[in-house]
Amino acid sequence: MASHGVPRVSSAAVDKSEAAKDKERKRIEQYRSLEKEVGEKIRVGDFANTTFQQISSLLQQNPEYYTIWNYRRILLLDVFHKELKSGNNAVSESQPEGADGQQATMTLAQQEIAMLVKEDLQFLIPLIKQFPKCYWIWNHRSWLLATATQHLPTKTALQLWQGELALDSKMLALDSRNFHAWDYRRKIVRELERLGGKSMVEAEFEYTTKMIQSNLSNFSAWHNRSQLIPRLLEERDSDAEARKKLFDGEFELITTALYTDPYDQSLWSYHQYLMSTLDRSSPLNSANYARSTAVLSPITNADRLGYLEQEIESIKDMLEGAEDCKYIYQALLEYSRLYLDIEAGNKMVTTKELAGWLAELRKLDPLREGRWRDMEMRMKL
Amino acid sequence: MSLAAGPGRGRVAGGQTPADLRLVIDKHVAYVQKLDTRRDELEYHLTEHLRVSGVYWGLVALHLMKHHDALPSQGVLDFALSCLRDNGGFGAAPGHDAHMLYTISAVQILAMTDNFAELEKRVPDGKKKIAGFIAGLQQPNGTFAGDEWGETDTRFLYGAFNSLSLLGYMPHQRPSETPMIDLPAAIAHIRACQNFDGGFGTSPGAESHSGQVFVCTAALTIAGEIDTFLGEDGKDRLGAWLSERQQASGGLNGRPEKLVDVCYSWWVMSSMAMIDRLHWIDSAKLTKFILECQDPDEGGISDRPGDMVDVFHLCFGIAGLSLLGHPDLIEVDPAYCMPRHITSKLVGR
Ligand SMILES: [Zn+2]
């Protein structure tokens, strides 16, 4: 899909002088002739170093040009295969030091591959910083790491992936919502866990805590936290009590945050996530869902009702001073519905109360009037 | 077909009040027609890696505005076929490598211009070859790669369903033949990408994103699985998340706390239409937002008022207005972003 979301500046928008037009014409000619030359060289199999440099130059001018990234990989693979086939299985005397002081034993061929991969990763850094949303750059990085993992000793591959984790943290520090960086992070962690044979779920959970502490309104960090909790509990081998303790802790964290800013959608989303673990009809709690999502376990209807009561009461208190906050009414209505689904005859919330909240919501949020009308019918208000 | 931005910006013409806003069809048609004459701009050349998708975007806008013959039909066909590679996939332009993204665009162009018969004439077994390229990209876990280099994303899974169905190679369209793809595995993968909020991400574990919601919802719609997959509860949950994307300006954003954008407006509202929840947002305000993104003098639509226009946002702006029932446009099919009468004929929707 095309780029978007940035204010556009077009050269066509400004009236250009003859000199400017001339300059643009020259740039077009240069670009097209470079492109033509590279294409020609690939067709005839000229994989010399100069071809590689020309590819770099094209990609620096146009990192969205996916075919050129493919050419880059064809060239790299050609070198890798030649190295591996050359029978350069000798182990060199001067091995590079590993980060932990231990040495990975590499053949000369592997050393060459490692060097080329590292160089290419370096080449990508300024590009990924300038174009953090370009799919093809992330894709090429991913490919380099996968290919290195295939050909290099585990220890060397692990070091490379650790470097990626550091880079990824830098990218997320620049833009904490970049979904490419979050997707890539989950991949890095998967690979580090696979190669190192050690779970990183505790460290990653800590990372989300740190992200949230530096900026409460970080939807992506809250999301990743929700992904980690079920695994964290499993790996800690938590019993029912430990699970409850963690669950309560999360409610405390999010409730404090909501009191600070009840108008923040990211926070409500995390609260909804916690509540969804109590919802029997949530698609993620169904048996045919691939990932484990359980938080409280075992869980009874009494547990569900207990938490629903507690949260409905707590959210009611939030109304004071924030009577114009639509999210509060939405939460009250949604959680009451969950409550009534479990225990229809209960008096904890009255129809009159529900109708009152809905009336407020309609006043505050007329954009979604159709949704409130459907809700009114569905809840028989 | 230039993908370059501009020349103008989306804005309300001087002296106009919001109530006077009207869709400037003649300007938009001229805008699309002029795109291929902008070869003196560097950006024309720097966006060649999107060219065939650009033709698709322009063509959709023209079709919906009832000007389907505003581009030379022979030229469109010749260009699309010049992007076909030996492996059955299409590149973005002649000489560019085959990729799922451009294969979808090329197949949609052939469908909109009614050229599948011509394809078979020029390339024996052409439809089957293209379908083979697409099916060959399915991975063991059910998802699809974009090309031989292996990047996977739910966007490519949608692309596969979209193209295969237009070509007539989805399993349910050929019940007596061995299926070309593993449909149950693909549906299971979509399930693995679903989140507690009802939305979908790029891969299992990724946060919900309206572009991904569109591709997963549309894939389920094309496969005829949307109702059983979501149920009424699931539609309510997803519909709630989608409806929260509408902001005070009337435009929709792609994720919480992001800026509104015409293209995201399309992905959100088409998803809402597919789950029968389009009435959960304010369509008058959304219509106004899209009309404010037009360049009233030179045509084209931008992502937001004040930004440069381009053909990508023109396509999704016009498609959005069609979905909202604009009287000057023909009906769009939300799962394909193509005229409904064409998808009806090809896939019986
Ligand atoms: Zn956009």
Image: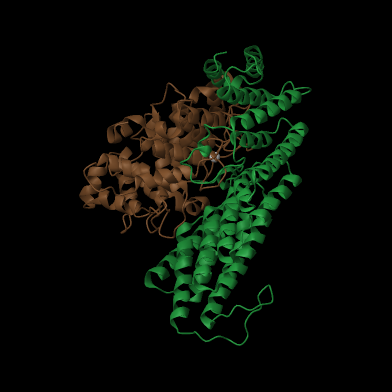
Chain colours: A green, B brown
Rendering coords of residue B91 (x, y %): 39, 54
Rendering coords of residue B8 (x, y %): 55, 38
Please state if A269 lies on the left or on the right of A53 as rendered. right
Front-most of A276 and B307? A276
Dividing the picture into quarters, in which one does residue B289 lie?
top right
Q: Is residue A188 something that shows in the picture?
A: yes
Relative to B31, residue A139 above or below:
below
Q: Quadrant of ligand 1?
A: top right
Front-most of B206 and A126? B206
Rendering coords of residue B298 (x, y %): 51, 34
Residue drawn 64% across the image and 46% down it: A239
Dividing the picture into quarters, in which one does residue A348 lie?
top right
Residue drawn 38% across the image and 52% down it: B138
Q: How many marks?
A: 0
**Which quadrant: the C terminus of chain A?**
top right
Relative to A194, residue A76 above or below:
below
Residue drawn 61% across the image and 43% down it: A6
Rendering coords of residue B303 (x, y %): 56, 37
Please state if B214 lies on the left or on the right of B221 as rendered. right
Q: Is residue B2 something that shows in the picture?
A: no
Relative to A238, residue A113 above or below:
below
